[in-house]
Image (tube, coloured by chain):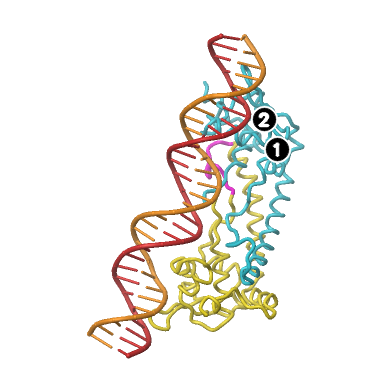
Chain colours: A yellow, B cyan, C orange, D red
Amino acid sequence: MKRDSRLSGVLHVLLHMAQQPGPFTSETLAKAMNTNPVVIRRIMAGLRDLGYVRSEKGHGGGWTLACELSKVTLRDVYTALGSPSLFAMGNRTEAPGCLIEQAVNAALDQAFDDAEALLLSRFGEVTLAMLSDDLRKRLGSRKLHSMSAHHA
Amino acid sequence: MKRDSRLSGVLHVLLHMAQQPGPFTSETLAKAMNTNPVVIRRIMAGLRDLGYVRSEKGHGGGWTLACELSKVTLRDVYTALGSPSLFAMGNRTEAPGCLIEQAVNAALDQAFDDAEALLLSRFGEVTLAMLSDDLRKRLGSRKLHSMSAHHA
DNA sequence: GTTTCATGTAACTTTGTATGTTACATGATG
DNA sequence: CATCATGTAACATACAAAGTTACATGAAAC
């Protein structure tokens, strides 16, 4: 399976935005991430709908942070993406008539459900502010890869 | 992403085999699972290499259980499949130069590592014998879907 | 008010992976 | 030696994520 990198991607965008005042166009963000503006708009759509960011059209438009970073968790962001499925493995048949399949599904589901609960709980413990703080530590004197560099 | 159902599939095969004496040809097993004999051989190859099952060619050949069901866990089976990746989500870049990417990866990796550890631990707690017992409970007087039926 | 810029979104293309299929080599049994 | 069964490579299909193109919508600048 091809792995879904939207969560990783959208967090990258958000941290970028947290480093300097906006607004940022989709194109600017896309260049910084080596991707396409439309991809940026797609992964940001859910965040906009939930009010974590705002988007404006026209001159001087683009994306702006619209939330307190300390109040938004990775879980919130994950939810904003539409809660995409977390696991690369699944049951052969979801509603099987076969009793063997049912027994297998029951065992696997239990393990996967536990793991999912833990994962989401961990996501819920990490705020964007924590990520941003961690980033600043890593930054030290160094620069980002970076958006400004790309446009210098 | 398309989800990997090999673990689910191979467990189904093993439980089938545990219900009645073998050997079972790949074709028989494939019919019971609505799939192809080659798929069966593929998902069984790892188990054979680790000695959990044996395969024999020629007349009267096929697959036979070669382990104590109470000593093989879901984790063993998962390992026999080659420990396929568990999560549908991943980092955009695995070894990023960008510090933002590093900060994001670090946070996500920690959560995913925890979830993976829990999941594998759960897998390690469930033996094939437990699955088989659970299946027998579910069976009651009912039949499987079943292999014998398919050949009646 | 018209040009320019930016998002919103549908439609299509590309790419990666799991699964399904065909074909044939290898080896065991009768 | 004919038949049966696995082993495996090679190819086909299906599907989802990501990338791309095209164009509509709306805001700001002139």
Left or right relative to B1: residue B61: right
Residue located at (66% from left, 55% from top) = A115
Magenta stretch: includes residue B3: no
- Pointer 1: what residue? B128
Magenta stretch: includes residue A95: yes
Q: Position of residue B105 (x, y in %)?
A: 64, 65
Q: Position of residue D9 (x, y in %)?
A: 56, 34
Establish if B76 lies above or below B91: above
Residue located at (70% from left, 77% from top) = A137
Specify the principal SS of the magenta part: loop
Q: Is any atom of residue B39 visible in this view? A: no
Left or right relative to C4: residue C15: right
Chain identifier of the residue bearing label 2 in the image: B
Quarter residue A123 falls in: bottom right
Amino acid under disc 1: Leu
Disc 1 packing (10 Å; few <14; some 14–19; many ≥20): many
Q: Is any atom of residue B106 visible in this view? A: yes
Q: Which residues are magenta?
A: A89-99
- Pointer 2: what residue? B18
Q: Closer to the N terminus: mark 2 or mark 1?
A: 2
Q: Position of residue A89 (x, y in %)?
A: 59, 48
Quarter residue A103 falls in: top right
